Image (cartoon, helix red, strand yellow):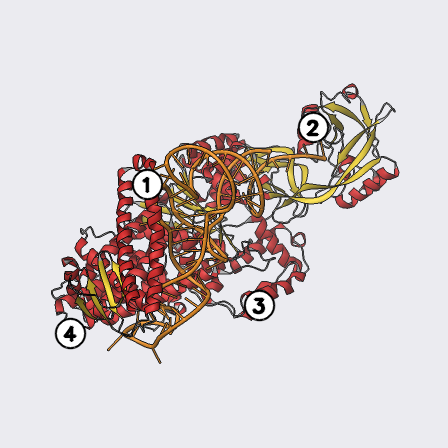
Amino acid sequence: MEKSYQPSEIEQRVYARWEENGYFTPRGDGERYCIMIPPPNVTGTLHMGHGFGDTIQDALTRYHRMRGCRTLWQPGTDHAGIATQMVVERLLNAEGQSRRDLGREKFVERVWQWKEESGGKISQQTRRLGASVDWTRERFTMDEGLSAAVREVFVRLYDEGLIYRGKRLVNWDPVLHTALSDLEVLSAEEEGHLWHFRYPLASGEGHLVVATTRPETMLGDSGVAVHPEDERYGHLVGQEIVLPIVGRRIPIIADPYVDPEFGTGCVKMTPAHDFNDYEIGVRHGLEMINIFTDDATLNDTVPEAFRGLDRFVARKAVTAELERLGLLDKVEPYTTKIPRGDRSHAVVEPYLTDQWYVKIEPLATPAIEAVASGKIRFVPENWSKTYFEWMHNIQDWCISRQLWWGHRIPAWYDDDANVYVGYDEADVRRKYGIGDDVALRQDEDVLDTWFSSALWPFSTLGWPEKTEALDDFYPGNVLVTGFDIIFFWVARMIMMGIKFMGDVPFREVYIHGLIRAEDGQKMSKSKGNILDPLDLIDGIDLESLVAKRTSGMMQDHLAPRIEEDTRRQFPDGIDQFGADALRFTFAALATTGRDIRFDLGRIEGYKNFCNKLWNAARYVLMNTEGLDGGPSEFTAADLWIKARLDAAVNAVHAHFANYRLDLATQTIYEFTWHEFCDWYLELSKPVLQSEEAGAALQRGTRRTLVEVLETLLRLLHPFMPFITEEIWQQVADRAGVHGETIMLQPCPEASGNTVDTEAVDDIEWVKQFILGLRQIRGEMDIPPGKALPVVLQHASELDQRRAERHALLLTRVGRVESVSLLGDDEQPPAAATALLGDLRLLVPMKGLIDVDAEKARLGKQIDKVRGELARANGKLANDKFVNNAPAAVVEQEQTRVRDFERTIAQLAEQLDKLDQLA
RNA sequence: GGGCGAUUAGCUCAGGGGUAGAGCGCCACGUUGACAUCGUGGAGGUCGCAGGUUCGAAACCCGCAUCGCCCACCA
């Protein structure tokens, strides 16, 4: 074995072997276990969020596979309609072309081509993480099979009246030229203005003042609303306004929506371009005047002078014109929420168009019930509140998008604009009895990407065909995802799963946090603070990192700043940490909080942990060569480490059951480093290296070394698959375990052996003994190599027996030169002291130890214990405590007081002795 | 406006009615036969603030402050 762990040499070779041998495919006839991967964008690259989610899912998958489950982790990718289309359009633009130049068919071909080019990338990156997904079942949301599922769902929902087409106000993205769902619109506060305009009354006498943040929309006004009980305006309701510039007569209406306290209490109504106005407009039969084109430039319904103007240009023009007319009352600075498309960042326009909708209420009701009844459990539980909050206020889902990349809507129109929905044109003709003489053309629109994602838990398993896979793996066990897509995806899968499979798509939803940069900022390209999981695995030099972070920037002016920050934060680039260290870090950070700051210190620490494990394995291998099956005897240390291992195994199982992977990793780390390496390996050395220990004892220790290591590797494997496989291949045979791969070995279970408490207590005693000496050594500046004579005072029979029995350990590990007993009537020598209960360890000074230093040390210890004693005594002096606290607690407190007093007495006595010496 | 969360060691975070924890960092010492990617010892905290419940609160309850997120939204 290499002297240190070199991940790069191992990982890719090991993964290739797993994949070639088909280890990721479900096997056996154990209980079913299934996780559906949240499909990443097919043209995307792996980011920290994927790394995190994949790590959690892989740990769960490997754990259950090792527990004997017939396990499927279903992989695949999403066509990501808007995102992908935008990327390809940008590529085209760089070539000086637009998608319109190409035409729909050519463009879609081009996207497929791009998908083929880049589509494998994220899958390759997922492999680098060690993800044990079943690649043979990899799916893509636009595969033929999944597309069939989409059509099936659409047709069935339509036939049931749960999908309808309607002309309504939608969120329109004037840059991408498509409708968006409510979820794809992000509102943020931006600074603007509030304009107050005078609208003259048609009677010729006076005016009303209305306020608006969007002056240009006044060209589409079809009313002015006041509150019904507003006495200032009551007499005007029913009268008319002459809309300035346009000259249209529009009514003054009364509607309770209006807040009389705000502004003047008069609101201009633009029902075709504002969601609230639309509602009111519908109630009052106001005219819906669409003043925009698809680009959000003014159309021909407005006065000629304004036609063709962009909305923001029009805003200035309208304001100027009203001012010229003397109708501008005032302008105030005003901060308001501006809705923008989540992809294009263009200001979204409420726009009247024909779109397809899913009638959501009938689907939402059982989906709410599924969570309320506990059929689906959120982890952490809190997220169910978020889910309910949204589901109770859910609106019909706009599913049509005016894009070219996606699932084309299976609807056809005849020349009279009648709609027919079916699987394909032939089906439509059959279904509706339409002859070949009638021309049909298919709807131009595609479906929202999330429509196909919503079917993922069953479409990937072959639905609507009745497949074995569906029987096997629906419903899945757990969905692992970030909270940002609970609405987009989780809720919709639940609705569709219940609707079409008659059962929920998964039993549990594990929601994890967002990975943030070290300073708590969101990682983003424009901030230049992105960490690429692959760079953490492979390492990257500074120049490459700078180039990567500053290239392809949307805003070039940020580049120098990013370069500077990057050079400061990573003067030497990023080290190679390996996939195991990265995964372990993710798992260790998977706490219940919302966001996770990625800490480079942690990954470095866990890389060291890999190295620690590697070297522990080297030690074990060096010492177990030629281990035979002869008779074995076990030392107390052997029995102790097995008991500790059992405890760790049990804890890890419990933590998995609660999805507390952070605690699971912590348990393993603690056991591996601080029990197995720090103590057991050290305690094994005297046995293996000593001539006195018999062959049987040595064999027992060697056997224990290799068996504990082999078990530990299996326990750790879900988190660190590569290094554990690599070591296991060399260790397994010696441990008497045979198999092709650690992946398919059983997960460790506690041995079920009753704990040998005598052995465990002995070793704890030995540890305390050695720790006491080390403390003296450390604080007294005694060279660690210097063997110390130790005098035992107040040694019980048990102490004496232990000292004899474990003399070898004390000598070799504790560097004890000799152990002698002090008789009750003997004067103790001047010595440094450590306490082990009643037992006093004395290290005679003999010029070794500085008296003043030891006095200072004892004084410090006494102070510390006195503080504790005072507190405990305070409690016991309190009658209320003594009378009310449980007896066990009181008793415990009394015991502590006795211990403290004894300790202080012993230390004080020792201090006295040193004082007399002076 | 409604909802959710956070506030614990220098940093990143666990914990949770009865003794304040980890990793990293820091200080000192160390070429001990796995490992200097290491070992040994050490320093370091009034658990955001103020009330309440309790014999006992860092933990439970109420309020406040600061930070963050989600949803809705007054033109």
Could you tell me how far apart the alpha carbons at marks 4 and 3 are, in whole angstroms?
57 Å
Q: Residues within 10 Å of mark 2 (few under 14, many from 20)?
A: some
The residue that mark 4 highlights is A691
Mark 4 or mark 3, whichever is nearer to me: 4
Where A774 sits versus A410, above or below? below
Can I make out residue A449 in this image? yes
Name the residue at 38% across, 70% down.
A6
Q: Chain of mark 1?
A: A
Please give left or right for residue A337 compared with residue A371 in the image: right
Q: What number is the disc on residue A877?
A: 1
Could you tell me how far apart the alpha carbons at marks 4 and 1 are, in whole angstroms?
57 Å
- Residue A96, how many percent across, how many down? 68, 60
Q: Are marks 1 and 2 on the same chain?
A: yes
Q: Amino acid at mark 4?
A: Glu
The residue that mark 3 highlights is A567
Q: What number is the disc on residue A232?
A: none
Mark 1 or mark 3, whichever is nearer to me: 1
> Which type of secondary structure does the marked residue at label 3 adopt?
helix
Q: Amino acid at mark 3?
A: Arg
Please give left or right for residue A327 compared with residue A282 in the image: right
